[in-house]
Image (tube, grey):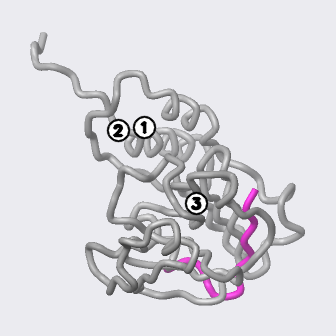
Amino acid sequence: MNDSKWTRPDRRSVLGAGAALLGGLATPAFAQSSVFEPIPENDPEVRRNISSFRALNWQPYFSSTAGGAILVDTTSRALHFWSADQTIYKLYPTSVPVSEELTRRGRTSVVQKVEGPSWSPTPSMKIRNPEWPDYVPPGPDNPLGTHALYLSWKYYRIHGTHDTRKIGRPSSNGCIGLYNEHIAELFALVSPGAQVLLI
């Protein structure tokens, strides 16, 4: 028997393992990860997220998948993607806004794709956080990570993050965040005009 101390997997690996398990039970491909890091011993958010992190059908949310369809469930903190021809389905853990006031729900669409996005805080962010810089260029300090999908709603994005602690938590100022490797994969699959629904 090995006496070394066991390290609990982090939220990312647990969600990835759940997606991998679901992937073994169904045809669609799922996002997964195998990174292990310590997490707090009794993290209720992790347990709640795992129980809600499951595959969904597109039919209750969209009349068709024309142009591709993205569903963001802010309760389970998951993003679902269906390709236009429904041959590709992806499920990713996300970050969500820190408060109900910052959360927007409804239908929008992808209007622009940017690799290596720059970032500027919105006017309301600057009021709340006057110490924040006016502009952050692309790179490791950029809050939008490596890729961003700009939505038809002004200031709203689906984007990556360099701070992996944010995923699975209410941690954004309104946007939906993904691990950089997941947004890169989604970025390659999504075209401008793709349907987006936040619930």
Q: Which residue is mark 1?
A: 14
In the image as oriented, which residue stretches furthest toward the right?
Answer: 63
Compared across the picture, whether 119 is left or right of 137 comes to: right
Q: CA distance from mark 2 to mark 1?
A: 6 Å
* Residue drawn at (10%, 13%) of the image: 3
Tag 1: amino acid: Val
**Vertical comparison of 101 with 4: above or below:** below
Whole-angstrom CA distance, mark 3 to mark 1, is 16 Å
Circle nearer the N terminus (2, 3): 2
Q: What amino acid is labelled 3 in the image? A: Lys
- Dot 2 amino acid type: Asp
Whether residues under marks 2 and 1 lie with C-beta atoms below 8 angstroms apart, the answer is yes
In the rendered view, does 160 fall on the left or right side of 191? left
In the structure shown, which secondary structural element does the residue marked by tag 2 occupy? loop
Residue named by callout 2 = 10
Secondary structure of the residue carrying tag 3 is strand
Mark 3 burial class by Cα count in 10 Å: few <14, some 14-19, many 20+: many
Residue found 54% across the figure and 47% down from its top = 23
In this rendering, the label closer to the viewer, 3 or 1: 1
Q: Are marks 2 and 3 in contact (CB under 8 Å)?
A: no
Work out whether mark 3 precedes mark 1 in sequence or the reverse, and give the earlier one: 1
Q: Nearer the viewer, residue 158 or 131?
A: 131
Q: CA distance from mark 2 to mark 3?
A: 21 Å
Where is residue 75? Give x, y as percent: 67, 45
Q: Which residues are magenta?
A: 188-199
**Residue at 77%, 53% in the rendered image:** 57
Where in the figure is residue 192, as x and y percent of width and height? 65, 88
